[in-house]
Amino acid sequence: MEGDRIRELFLSFFEEREHKRVPSSSLIPPPESGLLLTNAGMNQFIPIFLGQAEPTYPRAVTAQKVMRTNDIENVGRDARHLTFFEMLGNFSFGDYFKADAIRWAHELVTEGYGIDHDLLWVTVFERDEASVEAWIELGGLAPERIVRRGLVDQFGEPANYWWTHAAGPAGPCSEIFVDRGAKYGPEGGPDVDEERFMEIWNLVFIQDRVDGERTVIEPLPSENVDTGSSLERVALVLQGVDNAFETDLLRPILEVAEALSGRTHGHDPADDVSLKVIAEHGRATTFLIADGVQPSNQGRGYILRRMLRRVVSHARRLGIERSVMDPLIDVVVDRFGEAYPELRANEALMRQVAGSEEERFARTLRQGLVLFEEAKDRAGEGRISGEDAFKLSDTFGFPVQLTEELAAEAGLAVDGDRFAELLEEQRGRARDAAKKVPIGLDTGAAPPSTFVGYDQLDADGTIVSLLDPEFRELQGAEEGEEVRVFLDRTPFYAEGGGQVGDRGLIRTPSGLIRVNDTVAAGDRSTVHSGVVESGEVRSGEEAHAVVDADRREATARAHTSTHVVHATLRELLGEHARQAGSLVEPGRLRFDFPHPSAVAQEQLQEAELIANRRLARDDAPSIFETSMEEAKRLGAVMLFGEKYGDTVRVVEIGDYSRELCGGTHVLRTGNIGVIRLLHEGSIGAGMRRVEALVGPDALREINAERTLLHDLVEAIGSNDPRSAIDHARKVIEENKRLRSELGKLQKGDRDALIASLVEDAQDVDGLALVVSEVPGEDASGLRELAQKVRDRLQGRPAAVVLGGGADGKAQLVAASTSEAVARGVTAPELLREAASVIGGGAGGKDILAMAGGRDASAISEALGGIPARARELLSAR
Ligand code: ATP
Ligand code: MG
C-alpha cells in the first residue's frame, strides 16, 4: 500500500468514527510547550489536555509533521529511526478512553492495513489491567503476546509511561509491535529485538500532569487518548521492505542522492549511511525551512544548521562537489507538496535559505580540512585526539565518521571514547538548557483572563492573583513594591505577533499600580508587570485598568504600517519577500524578510511612495474572525509562528493587504499620516531587514535629516544646499590635486636620496658598499630604500646597509646583490654583529635581511663596523 494511501486510510478511518480532521501544526511549537521543535502529534493539543483551552470538538485525527533530533545518530544505521517523520494520531479529549482506542487500533491494523493478527505483540504499563483486558477481550490477543513494562525498559530508556520530555501532560501507554520475521532477528518478542519486532503505534492514555523530570504533579481534569504511529514505519511493514528508506516515501529522495553521487545503495555500508543521511536530512531540513526555521547558532536554528551541514559533509564524503539541496528540495516538494502545501508556498524561501547556508558551509568545510591537517600533525600515538574530532564535528559539522575516514587514509585512528565523552557532556548541557521554562511561571496554573482591548482602552475587573517578581503569591503589596498582576478582564495587549505589550495604570480602591509591560502566559492568561506607585493593593480587589492611550495609538500606527509596507514590498520584490519576523513599537517598526540581494535605493523610495499613497486613501481596515480554511481560501498571508487553530483573525486593508493578525490597528490608514523607510540591510543568509518610522515619529526623523543637511552645508562652507554639492565636489577635487603634487615632490626627494646613496658607494676589496643612516624611516621605508639602491648596483658585487630609528627603536636593513652573495657577503651575515650592537638579532634571506633592536642611540656605532665585517666575509672565501 502506498504511503499516500496509508495516510488517507488512517485519517478517514477515524473521520468515519466522528473524529475531526485537523491539519498538522507547524514544526515550530507554541512556546508554552517548552519544546524546541514539535515532537509529537499531541503538541498542538497541550492546552486542551491541561484544561486551559476548551476543545471545540471531542475527537480529532491528524497527520502531524514531527522532528526527533535525539534519534539523529540512528538515522541510516537502523531500519526504523528518522529525525523527521509524519505522525498519524487519533485523539480523545475527555471522550472515549482505553477500550475504544485499543479496539479501533486493532481493527485498523488488522482489517484496514491487513496485517496478520498473529504477527502482533503489544506492551502495556505494568499495572494497567484495563488495557490488558481490552487487548484480550476486544483485540483477541493471547496473554503471552502482552508484555508488561515499567517506567523504564531494560536499557534504562523511558518505556511505557509517555511524556513530551518537558513539563506537561503525560500518561501510561500501550505500544503495538509487528513481527517482521526471522530474517530480522531472534524470537522472543520486543524485549529481545526491536528491529525484528518493530513498534508501529503507541497509544497513550493522557491522564497526568508531570514536571520537567517526569514526576507526576496532579491528575488532569479528564481522561484522554493521544496516539502516534509513524507513517514511515507502517509503510515499511505494508510494503514489505527492509527499512524506511526503501518505502515509496523515502525511496525517491534516496534515488536523488544516488544519482548525485553515482553510487548505489547496498554496496558499501559506509556509503549507505551517507546516502540515507543525505536523503533523510534533506527532507527534514526542507520541512524545517518551510515552517520558518532559519539557520543560526542557537536553539532550533542550530539544529537546522547542523543538519544542513551533515547533508553537505556526507555529500562531500561521496565525492559530490555540486550543490545538493536544490535537487533534494525538488524531489521533496514533488513528493510531499500535495499533502503539505506550505512546501509549495515557500519554495523560493527554501531554496534561498538552503542554498546560501550550503555555500557558507562549503567555505567552512575547506577551513575544516585545514584544521584536520593540523589535527593530523598533532596526533599522538597514531590517534587524532577526541578533542580535535569533537571540535571538527561541533564547529565544522564534520561527522565523526568523516574524520575517521580521513584519518584512516592517513593511517591514523580517532580517539572515539573521548569523542563520545565530550558529545555526552554537550548533550547534557543542551538538556539542561531545554529544561528552562521561559517565563519562570507555571503557565498551566496561571489564572485565565479575557482580553477586551481591541475596542476598549480601559476596563473594570478584579485582581485574581498578585505575585512578586519570582512569581510567589502575595496577599498585598505596598508603595514601591514590584508586582505581577492577573486580572479576570483586561484591556492591556500582551506582547505578541511582534507587537510590544501595553503600558498603563491599574487603579484599585486603595492603590495605584504603574504597568511597565504586559506579556502572555500560556494561551489564555496575561501578566501585567509593574510597581505599586501609591497606596497599597490586595489580591481579590476590584480594579480599573487604563491603557496608556498615546503609546497604544503610536503602536497601532506602526502595526498597520507594517502590513502596508509588507504588502508593498511583496508587490515590488516578489512573493518570496514574506515577513519572517517583526518588531512593532510605538511609532517604529522593523521587519525581516528573505531576499537574495540588497534592495536598491530607488526601489526603497518607490516602496515608500506607494505605501504613503496607500495611507492617503484613508481605508478603514476591516477586521474579522473566520475559520482557518476560509482564511486560506481568501489568500490571507499566514506568517510563520501562527498557530493553526480553528478560528483566526484576519486584518484586511483596502484591496492590497490581507493577513492573519492578532494585533491592534488604527481605525483608518489616514491616522498614520506618513511612513518613512529608514534603511534596509542584510542580517545574514539571504535575510534582509527594513526599519521605518511612522506618524509624528517619522516627522521627527525628517526634521533630524533636515538639521543634518543644514550642518553639512555649513561645514562645507556654502550657504545654499543646492550649490553645496558642487562646492563639496570642488573641495574634494582640489584636495586630490594637492595630494598628488605633494606625492610627486616627495617622490622627487626620494629619487634624489637614492641617487646620492648610490653615489656614496665605497669600494671594499672590490665590493661596492653603501652604508648610511637614514633617520625618520620605519622598517618598510628602509627596506624599500635599500632594495632600490641595491637594484641600481645590480650586476656587480654590491651591498647596502641602512640604519634608522622610529619611536626610539633601532632598525637595520641589509641588501646584497647576487654577485655579492656569491662572494660570501650575504645580507644576514653582514648584519650579524651590527644587530647585536643595537641589542637585537638579524634574520632574512641571502639578498635581504633586517634587524631590529631597542637601542636607537647605537645605530651609528653599529653601522661603523659594517665595512670591516664586509672585509672579513670577503676574505673568508
Ligand atoms: P522507539 O522506541 O521505536 O524509538 P518511541 O518509543 O520513541 O519509539 P513514541 O514516542 O512512542 O516512540 O512514538 C510513537 C510512534 O512514533 C512509534 O510507535 C513509532 O511508530 C514512531 N516513531 C518514533 N520514533 C521514530 C523515529 N525516530 N522515526 C520514525 N518513526 C518513529
Ligand atoms: Mg515507544
Image: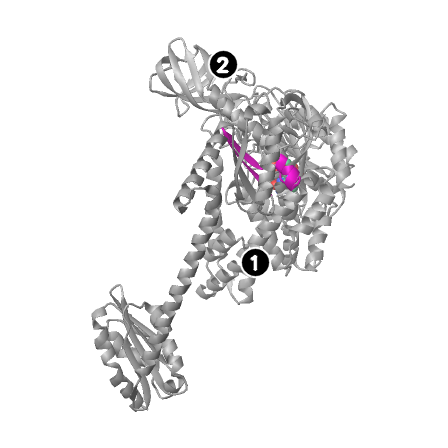
Residue 873 at x, y percent in the picture: 30, 87
Q: CA distance from mark 2 to mark 1?
A: 63 Å
Q: In the displayed orientation, state which residue is furthest to the top.
A: 509
Mark 2 lies within 8 Å of ligand 1 (Cβ measured): no
Indicate left or right for 874 with 568 as reference: left
Closest to the camera, between mark 2 and mark 1, is: 2
Q: Amino acid at mark 1?
A: Leu
Q: Nearer the viewer, residue 578 or 765?
A: 765
Give the residue number, with chain letter if any, for mark 1. Answer: 402
Mark carried by residue 132: none
Q: Which residues are magenta?
A: 568-594
Residue 106 makes an appearance in the image: yes
Residue 61 at x, y percent in the picture: 69, 28
Q: Nearer the viewer, residue 514 or 247?
A: 514
Give the quadrant of residue 11. Answer: top right
Residue 398 at x, y percent in the picture: 54, 55
Residue at image location 53% in from the left, 63% down from the top:
407
Task: Assess whether mark 1 and mark 2 are in contact (beta carbons under 8 angstroms).
Answer: no
Decide: few, some or many residues near mark 1? Use Cα within 10 Å; few <14, some 14-19, many ≥20: many
Q: Nearer the viewer, residue 428 or 188?
A: 428
Indicate left or right for 792 with 4 as reference: left
Indicate left or right for 453 with 627 as reference: left
Q: Amino acid at mark 2?
A: Asp
Residue 846 makes an appearance in the image: no
Element at badge 2?
Answer: strand
Give the residue number, with chain letter if any, for mark 2. Answer: 458
Q: Is residue 584 magenta?
A: yes
Mark 2 or mark 1: whose residue is earlier in sequence: 1
Q: Is residue 369 magenta?
A: no
